[in-house]
Image: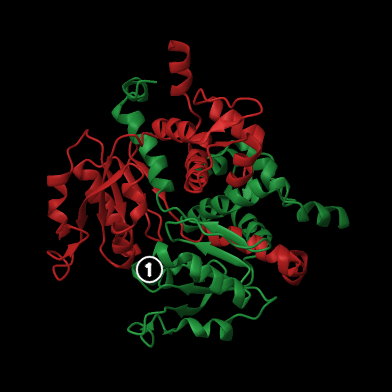
Chain colours: A red, B green
Amino acid sequence: MSVEHSAKREIPDATVARLPGYLRALGQLAAVDVLSVSSEELAHSSGVSSAKLRKDLSHLGSYGVRGVGYDVTHLSYQISRALGLTHDWPVIIVGMGNLGRALASYGGFATKGFQVVALLDRDPAVVGHMLDELVIQPMDALDVHVTPGEACIGVIATPAESAQQVADLLVSAGVSSILNFAATVIQVPEGVHMRKVDLSTELQILAFHEQQRVGIDPDELLEGAGR
Amino acid sequence: MSVEHSAKREIPDATVARLPGYLRALGQLAAVDVLSVSSEELAHSSGVSSAKLRKDLSHLGSYGVRGVGYDVTHLSYQISRALGLTHDWPVIIVGMGNLGRALASYGGFATKGFQVVALLDRDPAVVGHMLDELVIQPMDALDVHVTPGEACIGVIATPAESAQQVADLLVSAGVSSILNFAATVIQVPEGVHMRKVDLSTELQILAFHEQQRVGIDPDELLEGAGR
């Protein structure tokens, strides 16, 4: 047990980054009542090689059964557990523009181990309004919702020009994990985890496939650029 | 040249999926005026091993210079070219709720090779309103904007219950690449590329790091679940 335990503790970052993809693929299988899945199928729908999938899952102590594959429900649970999603994480969303509102009412968070506990905005015209059973609060309310040392994830959904200031406020309140949706680079002190979401990432992958399909030759553009 | 050419054509899907991440990391370096980057640094900020980074970039015919690394601007251009981002892709966004509006006004698309050419909604109360210099149009307008066989990316930002119907409409109009933001699984015929964006993916990765930091032991939960 202790060997299994210590193996679990050392999940490489690259594996962690792929786990949500596996979880998503498993969720899609569960939605259409698939009970078990081969490593090849799961790898294919997750966009990785099956060798890598098996390696990744072995870090969780999870091995498929030859000829049967992985149990969809159990593997989902194992990945959720590894990611820390089997209990709710409090999430604070800052910035109640279109994106902040979209995130606040995004159905996917609640079912995936996240609970939006506060919606904040600095605009007095917005503060006090209700959104999905929460009252939008001023930035001062940050201290009420964050206890330094306790888990809390801050989501920045403000315009780019306010993002750094909001990040600073989150950090001084004691938030140690920040998800930045603002289209700008922000700096956080060491010890604070920050991830930036670029909504154009998936569009870029689609563009690659569109390019293959339409048959535009990138070399023409290369030559056109006079390289 | 022909050898280099054919090598470029066979970029593995897993590499394609990582290219936007490299591009984003390079963009962040360029934003702070960094001119060149080592494979180790770029790999670290992209969350992959440097061996994998070098392998991925070799598919693009791109090799760093020993002791100098990669030229940030040139590598950005090479990745953009491989992804097909050196010319604009037309994008149609369907669903003008909070998420659709957020996507329509998301500054990141325009700078990254995408041009939002149409905003559609089936709600007559919304149709006719302006949003970022575009008039929101009814679903019928799909045929005006899509020419079968020509590149076009459709973005679904509707509630989950309308997503499949919208996907069907996009496909019959001739859209062959679809990005689905709706929190549901949709089916598309073979030959249509579909990607699903799960806004909770990055939160899940953050949760993993929060868990490591706060020191919650996943095994306790495992045992609690009575496995």
The amino acid type of the residue labelled 1 equals Ala
Number of other residues with Cα within 10 Å of mark 1, as a class: few under 14, some 14 to 19, many 20 or more:
some
Could one spot residue A216 in this view of the protein? no
Vertical comparison of A87 with A194: above or below = above
Residue at x 48% of width, y 73% of height: B93
Rendered location of residue B36, percent (x, y): 59, 49
Q: Nearer the viewer, residue B54 or B209?
A: B209
Judge from the rendering whether residue A186 lies leftward or rightward of residue A148; answer left or right.
right
Residue at x 60% of width, y 42% of height: B38
Q: Nearer the viewer, residue B165 or A206?
A: B165
The image quadrant of residue A41 is: top right
Vertical comparison of B81 with A89: above or below = below
Rendered location of residue A163, percent (x, y): 31, 58
The image quadrant of residue B102 is: bottom left
Q: Nearer the viewer, residue B54 or B162?
A: B162
What is the quadrant of the C terminus of chain A in the image? bottom right
Rendered location of residue B144, percent (x, y): 57, 86
Judge from the rendering whether residue B57 lies leftward or rightward of residue A189; answer left or right.
right
Q: Which residue is mark 1?
A: B102
Rendered location of residue A105, percent (x, y): 30, 59
Q: In the displayed image of the protein, which residue is found farthest to the right? A: B2
Vertical comparison of A109 with A133: above or below = above
SS label for mark 1 = helix
Q: How many marks?
A: 1
Chain letter for the residue marked with disc 1 in the picture: B
Residue at x 32% of width, y 68% of height: A98
What is the quadrant of the N terminus of chain A in the image? top left
Judge from the rendering whether residue B30 lies leftward or rightward of residue B182; answer left or right.
right
Could one spot residue A193 in this view of the protein? yes
Q: In the displayed image of the protein, which residue is found farthest to the top? A: A2
